Image (cartoon, grey):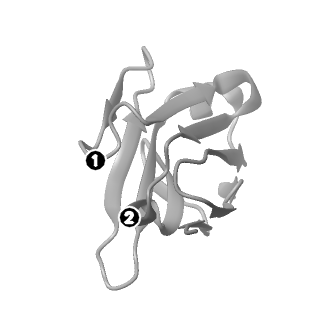
Amino acid sequence: QVQLVESGGGLVQPGGSLRLSCAASGLTFSAFSSHVMTWYRQAPGKQRALVARISSAHGVTNYDDSVKGRFTISRDNANKAVYLQMNNLKPEDTAVYYCNALYQASYWGQGTQVTVSS
């Protein structure tokens, strides 16, 4: 079955950086390449919200306004992975970050905690 596993979260001081990874299994290279990949986050007491998305065909990206210029989403179809480079982190970026793969079905990872605090 399809599985997404996130990693790279942790505790970081304001202004710091983290790189999240999401590794997919149970998909062929071709199938993974067809999926739109999205990072979401859910802060305590808030709904899950889109952070960044990268398309399947041409790698077109879009971001929530709150992270534009600080976060970068990328994908490596050969290794069936998607990444989120997060720079200049702020306390309001604290959340559980989830990876989602969408094509004919929607798949979610288990999430990775990111805490930004001094």
Q: Quadrant of residue 92?
A: bottom left
Alpha carbons under labels 1 and 2: distance apart:
9 Å
In the foreground, 47 or 69: 69
Q: Amino acid at mark 1?
A: Ser
Residue ID for mark 2 = 92
Quadrant of the drawing holding the N terminus: bottom right
Say which quarter of the image contains residue 70.
Answer: top left
Image height check: is 84 above or below 51?
A: above
Q: Which residue is mark 1?
A: 66
Residue 116 locus on image (x, y percent) = 54, 64
Element assignment for label 2: helix
Circle 1: element type: loop
- Residue drawn at point x = 59 percent, y = 32 percent: 31
Vertical arrangement, residue 62 with respect to residue 23, above or below: above
Q: Residues within 10 Å of mark 2 (few under 14, many from 20)?
A: few
**Mark 1 touches mark 2? (CB < 8 Å):** yes
Vertical arrangement, residue 95 with respect to residue 85, above or below: below
How crowded pointer 1 is (Cα within 10 Å; few <14, some 14-19, many 20+) is rated as few
Going by the image, does 15 lie left or right of 112? left
